[in-house]
Amino acid sequence: MIEAAQFVEAARERGFDWYAGVPCSFLTPFINYVLQDETLHYVSAANEGDAVALIAGVALGAQTGRRGIAMMQNSGLGNAVSPLTSLTWTFRLPQLLIVTWRGQPGVADEPQHALMGPVTPAMLDTMEIPWELFPTEADAIGPALDRATEHMDRTGRPYALVMQKGSVAPYALKKTGLVGVRERAVRVEPQRFAGERVTRHDALQRVIAHTPKGSTVVLASTGFCGRELYAIDDRENQLYLVGSMGCVAPMALGLALSRPDLRVVALDGDGAALMRMGVFATLGAYGPANLMHLLLDNGAHESTGGQATVSRGVDFAAIASACGYALALDGDDIGVIDRLFDAKDVDGVRFARLSIRTGTPGDLPRPSITPEDVRARLQRHLAGR
């Protein structure tokens, strides 16, 4: 058994100062220690996949030597499969995973862990994530972290430490609340604007006009959103998600929090937003003023044949407002985009939902640049600012 401070401080020496996750009783002393050190950054995620995507955003914007850790119970690996296999693996965005081993064979546990416990190692192996047991002796901490960082630096991909019960000595939580979460005394009312719907193409052109390369990063959701942005103007300050549906918002949050010098824009779609709506609460709580969340809503899964979503019955602006966004806009008028970017004195993340028409150019290309090259190009661009 080790003390939480022994691991956290050894990790800090190796650049790990960002943490995101969902609690597990095995992680309690570890999280309690991190929460009470305001020189570390901890984000309480709505689910494990959001935590992975958020730390991927930290890795995307990381200055030299800065690293992040995603923490979860092994049951949460199911929530994290998509970002681990189609985001971190595909773009080569490294992070350290701390995964607890509930239901470990031979260790009594609750019935819901009876299957996940035995298959946890195989799940990590299947996702090609190297792993080892979380260190339980002080002199094993440094070597374990060095193996992890060597793999992360060499491959650009995650490494996992699997934590057994009783690995970390108890550490009391001496203060309540979460660092970095804003409490709003007054809920902002959604602002609504009527008008004539435009195409996605028109909306993306307007976004490009508001996002100069020198100061802004644009992350585009999977599907036609990223493909059409690429077709209009493939700029080095843009990244096009592939797969990892619903992960653009938590990824943008990680980038915006870790890089306050950047203006970060998350271009979302209605289907993707519906998939991970818990992230609205996380963005409302932690989202900084340099983050914008723009949802282009055409009411359809257009890239898979146009099947309808349920978005027409969802008031996304009201949800954003209720979750604590500092600005919530909604409408059919393309001027909503101008209002989103031009709003002054907004203390926190801002949101806009623009209702758009369906329809996509028939000759819409797929990006010829690989996801790995898109990521590398963006990081070179940020380094050269």
Image (cartoon, grey):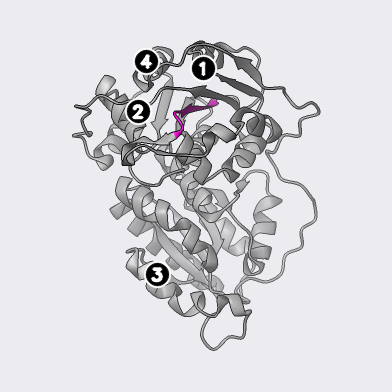
**SS at mark 2?**
strand
At which x and y percent is residue 161? Answer: 47, 67
Q: Amino acid at mark 2?
A: Gln
Which quadrant holds residue 351? Answer: top right
Residue 225: image quadrant is top left
Q: Is residue 300 found inside the magenta-colored segment of the image?
A: no
* Camera-side mark, 4 or 2: 4
Q: Is residue 124 visible?
A: yes
Q: CA distance from mark 4 to mark 2?
A: 17 Å
Please say if the residues under marks 1 and 3 sit with CB atoms less than 8 Å apart: no
Q: Residues within 10 Å of mark 4 (few under 14, many from 20)?
A: few
Q: Which mark is residue 332?
A: 1
Name the disc covering residue 238, or none: 2
Residue 296 sits inside the magenta stretch: yes
Q: Amino acid at mark 3?
A: Met
Name the mark on residue 123.
3
Q: Residues within 10 Å of mark 2 (few under 14, many from 20)?
A: many
Per the rendered image, the range of residues in magenta is 291-299
Is the magenta region chiefly helix, strand or loop? strand
